[in-house]
Amino acid sequence: MNRISVSMLAACGALASFPAMAADTDLQALREEIAQMKKSYERRIDALEKRLASAESTAGATAPPAASATAGARGAANSFNPEISLVLQGAMTKTQREPSSWTLRGFVPAGEPDEVGPSRRKGLSLGESELALAANVDPNFRAAVNLSLSATNTMAVEEAFFQTLGLGNGLTLKGGRFLSGIGYQNEQHPHTWDFADAPLAYAAFFGNRLTAEGLQMKWLAPTDTWLELGLEAGRDNAFPGSDRNKNGSALGAIFAHTGGDVGISSSWRAGLSAVGTRPTNRGFAQTDTTGNANTVAFSGNSRTVGADFVWKWAPNGNPSERNFKLQAEAFRRVEKGELSCVDAAAAGAGNCGVRLAGNYDATQNGLYVQGVYQFMPHWRAGYRYDRLDSGNAAIGMVNSGALAAANLPQFAAWKPRRDTVMIDYASSEFARLRFQYARDVSRGPGLVDNQFWLQYVMSIGAHGAHQF
């Protein structure tokens, strides 16, 4: 009733401010009518306020002490009300080639296959599901944990961090394990992605996503244009780093994001980022030309810089009917250090012997561009283009003649690429079904892999709003 009264009084004030173009008699009549309406609504407001005060006092006086105590106990019990959500993901996949042998030729493997990487499993299987718990600890801190549930019946801590709420001056501090703020897609969980798998650039440079374990500081500038700066420092036990079994920080990242609106229908975001790590014996297993297994490992400095851009469009700013999203990121990585090769069997059984080592210097690039269009309510279609360039790495063991290049097949120069199309249906913000097809040429010359996905994403419970 108060809202109606305020609106009516505002309208009346607007009428009273009409310029003196009308006849004096008309103006006088309007003024009298407005005065009467004001008096009438003021009396009604006073009457309602008195009734409300009387009802509140009566309820307080007649409430039994036991009932009051019970109500207080219930309030205390419900004072901790965390956000709890469970996101289920799974897919039916069919690939032309054996999914478990998928690799990016020319790029060092990220380690064990990631459930959200390119299609690594056959048939119907669970993807990476997520159990999340988040809540404000007190007026100063917020805490969150995200547990990753894999198809192999294992559980891992994807994120577990605290975050400040009241530092002021646009500053926010986060500590623990969290998805790094570099790039655009890295901070997003897989169930929010527009495609079923990560872009090839993320697979090659970050093992599908970069996880930091340390501290992150963000600063939101007090400017008309949105501007965010961030710093991160911590352990580099995740790819492209390695578990060095040492104290101190070996991962550092810096990023800057800016964005704004263009009219009422479009908005954009752009960013720059850089991340550096110092892996020690970051290795992977392979087979040399003699058929013997050996381990190849890199130790040195790894530096990656990136740029990202996102453009969103929706008619009159309302995305419920139609909307379009353009997303692109590019990365460049430089690694310098030592590359070693050690036979897994007895010394001399393979070409690497007890240990071969030499310098390693590689500069590699990658990018992806994707567009997703919601052409009608609930239905979207999208296309993504992936391209990488491994460059020509300088490998000391090969240049010196100690080891033939054929014994390091993973380092053969190649430009992996992939074309992906998808169409999905969301019955609500909690349920999505997606069909996806990709023509993947990542394994090497002539090794085309046609990949088909039928994916589901189902969310249960409270979940925080997604980022831009």
Image (cartoon, rainbow, N blue to C red):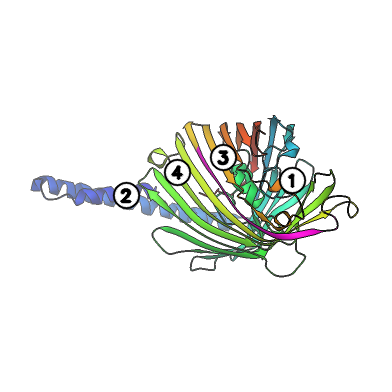
Q: Position of residue 191 (x, y in %)?
A: 62, 42
* Closer-to-camera residue (234/139): 234
Q: Give the secondary structure at mark 3.
A: loop
Mark 2 vs mark 1: in front: 1
Looking at the rendered structure, the kind of residue marked 3 is Asp
Q: Position of residue 115 (x, y in %)?
A: 71, 42
Q: Give the secondary structure at mark 2.
A: helix
Mark 4 vs mark 1: in front: 1
Q: Which residue is mark 3?
A: 194
Residue segment shown in magenta: 353-371
Mark 3 or mark 1: whose residue is earlier in sequence: 3
Q: Which residue is mark 2?
A: 41
Q: Which residue is mark 4?
A: 312
Q: Position of residue 295 (x, y in %)?
A: 80, 52
Looking at the rendered structure, the kind of residue marked 1 is Ala
Residue 239: within the magenta? no
Q: Give the secondary structure at mark 4.
A: strand
Mark 4 or mark 1: whose residue is earlier in sequence: 4
Measured Cα–Cα span from mark 2 to mark 3: 53 Å
Measured Cα–Cα span from mark 2 to mark 1: 90 Å
Q: Which residue is mark 1?
A: 406
Q: Residues within 10 Å of mark 2 (few under 14, many from 20)?
A: some
Mark 2 vs mark 3: in front: 3
* Closer-to-camera residue (449/322): 449
Residue at 49% in and 60% down: 228
Measured Cα–Cα span from mark 4 to mark 2: 45 Å
Looking at the rendered structure, the kind of residue marked 2 is Tyr
Q: Which image quadrant for residue 322?
A: top left
